[in-house]
């Protein structure tokens, strides 16, 4: 019942502050591709897109709102599962509820609970994996391991950081599984999960939506990745390209140890008492349930090793799935403090006080956590203030002015036009053209994938793509790009939106 209350309270909070429309960046990419079922940027996230597609059929709001809603549902589910994890490991209700509250109003978690993103879904998967393993250990029923393996395999299509739990799960089974059937259940579930992930990938690949990342970014500019058409001519090769995420590979494990240490200090910089709770919680786990301590420490550590060595600019969003371990360890630390309070109260001089030791300890733990959280709502207000802008009654064009610009541009395009644009506008243009207006014949292509700062030369494969299609379809570019001006003529078009038509150079 309390887990259900956590879910409903979290869902009510996030729906109240949910972004009602089109966003920017990766969010609008997910909003668009959930509707059109195209492949996203690596590693593709096919399972997430198929779940989001189901949400697009809900009879509320617009398509973008419905995809945003999925994040809210995932976030509320993560809170409920965290409560159940805490109850199994700690046993104290009120302190665990307090920790759930702390995660629910965490600014980073909250922001990603109200926009179309992957990270609350990853947090829900992590919490579900922990819960299923704890239930299996408690009840010795193979179905829990099977479902845990299934979710682990499916996580490849939601967020691959969850899959980093796999070595910790294997070690945990080595320490706890006494029968071969347990391993068969876990392996069978994982195999089915991976098979469903592959099936989802193949389905999206077969649909081959015009808005797919393949069509919009990769195929026209294969040479920037050192690829040829032959390297990309079947689904398995395309899946390998997605899993490799080669455009991000140079950012992984390229930092010196000093930078990794700096990232670790930033991650564990909440306050000295939170760090004390984490340490106390982990120590108590190893003393009382050392196998579960090994599971949580190894799984958490594997994720953090990857995060601290990934130099992408928005690395903090990868913290969100790890928050499950953070707040679970803090709950264990609070549980130890509650037990200490209960121990002291049981030695009180009167029986009336002794009989209420458990209640008093619960309340003491909750009051302690409330004191720790006193400054947190102020921090969370930054998130809520940002989200309340979407609830102010303003039209979406005021929230996202680029949407109005995209609409004006699309109104002036031919039905079969090709437009080259920047990544930041690519999927907003697709959303307005394909999702809102149904103009599926217009194609938008990123003209500078993988370009470095100051680099202007166009990819050879992109020039070949333009040359082979220019006589069949009208082509435009949203800014004057020197990488094309030496090969084609760029003619500025009249109107409020800056747009250049691509034409062949005329012979002198």
Image (cartoon, rainbow, N blue to C red):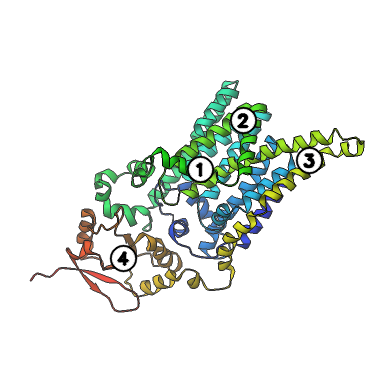
Question: In front of the other: label 4 or label 2?
Answer: 2
Labels 3 & 1 near each other (Cβ < 8 A): no
Residue at 25%, 74% in the rendered image: 492
For disc 2, the neighbor class at 10 Å (few under 14, some 14 to 19, many from 20) is: many
Task: Give residue 333's quadrant in the image.
Answer: top right
Q: Nearer the viewer, mark 4 or mark 3?
A: 3
Task: Give the secondary structure at mark 1.
Answer: helix
**Foreground residue, 161 or 8?**
161
Residue at point 43%, 73% (across, down): 404
Q: CA distance from mark 4 to mark 1?
A: 45 Å
> Which sits earlier in the primary sequence, circle 4 or circle 1?
1
Residue 357 falls in which quadrant of the image? Answer: top right
**Foreground: disc 3 or disc 1:** 1
* Spot occupied by residue 11 in the image (x, y as percentages of width and height): 64, 55
Q: Disc 4 and disc 2: Cα gap in Å?
A: 54 Å
The residue pinned by badge 2 equals 292
Residue placed under numbered mark 1 in the picture: 265
Disc 4 to disc 3: CB gap under 8 Å: no
Q: Earlier in the sequence, mark 3 or mark 1?
A: 1
- Say which label, 4 or 3, has the lower sequence index: 3
Up the image or down, 11 lies above or below 299; here it is below
Q: Which mark is residue 361?
A: 3
Q: Which mark lies nearer to you, 4 or 1? A: 1
Helix, strand or loop at mark 4? strand
Q: Position of residue 269 (x, y in %)?
A: 55, 46
Residue at the spot 56% in from the left edge and 41% down from the top edge: 126
Disc nearer the start of the sequence (3/2): 2
Report which residue position mark 4 lands on: 419
Mark earlier in primary sequence (2, 1): 1
Element type at marker 3? helix
């Amino acid at each position: 019942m309390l887990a259900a209350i956590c879910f409903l309270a979290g869902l009510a909070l996030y729906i109240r502050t949910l972004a009602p429309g089109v966003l920017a960046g990766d969010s609008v990419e997910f909003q668009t591709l959930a509707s059109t079922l195209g492949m996203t940027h690596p590693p593709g996230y096919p399972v997430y897109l198929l779940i989001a597609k189901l949400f697009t059929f809900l009879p509320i709001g617009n398509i973008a709102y419905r995809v945003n809603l999925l994040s809210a549902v995932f976030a509320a589910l993560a809170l409920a599962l965290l409560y159940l994890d805490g109850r199994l490991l700690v046993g104290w209700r009120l302190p665990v509820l307090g920790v759930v509250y702390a995660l629910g109003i965490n600014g980073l978690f909250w922001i990603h609970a109200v926009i179309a993103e992957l990270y609350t879904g990853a947090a829900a998967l992590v919490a579900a994996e922990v819960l299923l393993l704890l239930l299996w250990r408690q009840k010795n029923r193979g179905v829990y391991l099977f479902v845990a393996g299934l979710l682990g395999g499916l996580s490849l299509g939601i967020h691959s950081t969850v899959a980093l739990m796999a070595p910790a799960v294997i070690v945990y089974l080595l320490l706890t599984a006494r029968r071969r059937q347990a391993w068969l259940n876990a392996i069978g579930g994982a195999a089915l999960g991976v098979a469903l992930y592959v099936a989802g990938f193949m389905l999206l690949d077969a649909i081959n939506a015009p808005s797919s990342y393949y069509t919009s970014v990769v195929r026209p500019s294969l040479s920037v990745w050192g690829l040829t058409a032959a390297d990309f001519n079947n689904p398995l090769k395309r899946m390998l390209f997605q899993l490799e995420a080669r455009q991000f590979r140079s950012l992984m494990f390229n930092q010196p140890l000093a930078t990794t240490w700096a990232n670790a200090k930033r991650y564990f910089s909440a306050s000295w008492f939170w760090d004390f709770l984490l340490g106390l919680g982990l120590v108590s786990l190893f003393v009382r349930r050392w196998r579960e301590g090994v599971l949580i420490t190894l799984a958490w550590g594997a994720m953090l090793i990857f995060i601290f060595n990934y130099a992408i600019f928005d690395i903090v969003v990868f913290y969100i799935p790890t928050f499950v371990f953070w707040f679970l360890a803090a709950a264990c630390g609070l549980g130890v403090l509650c037990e200490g309070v209960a121990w002291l109260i049981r030695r009180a001089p009167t029986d009336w006080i002794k009989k209420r030791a458990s209640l008093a300890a619960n309340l003491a733990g909750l009051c302690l956590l409330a004191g720790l959280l006193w400054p947190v709502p102020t921090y969370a207000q930054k998130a809520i203030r940002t989200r309340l802008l979407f609830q102010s009654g303003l039209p979406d064009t005021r929230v996202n002015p680029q949407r109005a610009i995209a609409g004006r541009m699309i109104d002036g395009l031919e039905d079969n036009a090709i437009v080259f644009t920047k990544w930041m506008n690519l999927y907003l243009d697709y959303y307005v053209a394909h999702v809102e207006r149904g103009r599926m014949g217009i194609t938008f292509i990123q003209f500078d994938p993988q370009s470095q700062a100051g680099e202007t030369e166009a990819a050879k494969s992109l020039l070949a793509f333009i040359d082979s299609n220019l006589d069949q379809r009208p082509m435009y570019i949203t800014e004057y790009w020197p990488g094309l001006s030496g090969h084609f003529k760029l003619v500025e078009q009249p109107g409020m939106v800056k747009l250049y038509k691509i034409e062949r150079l005329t012979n002198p």
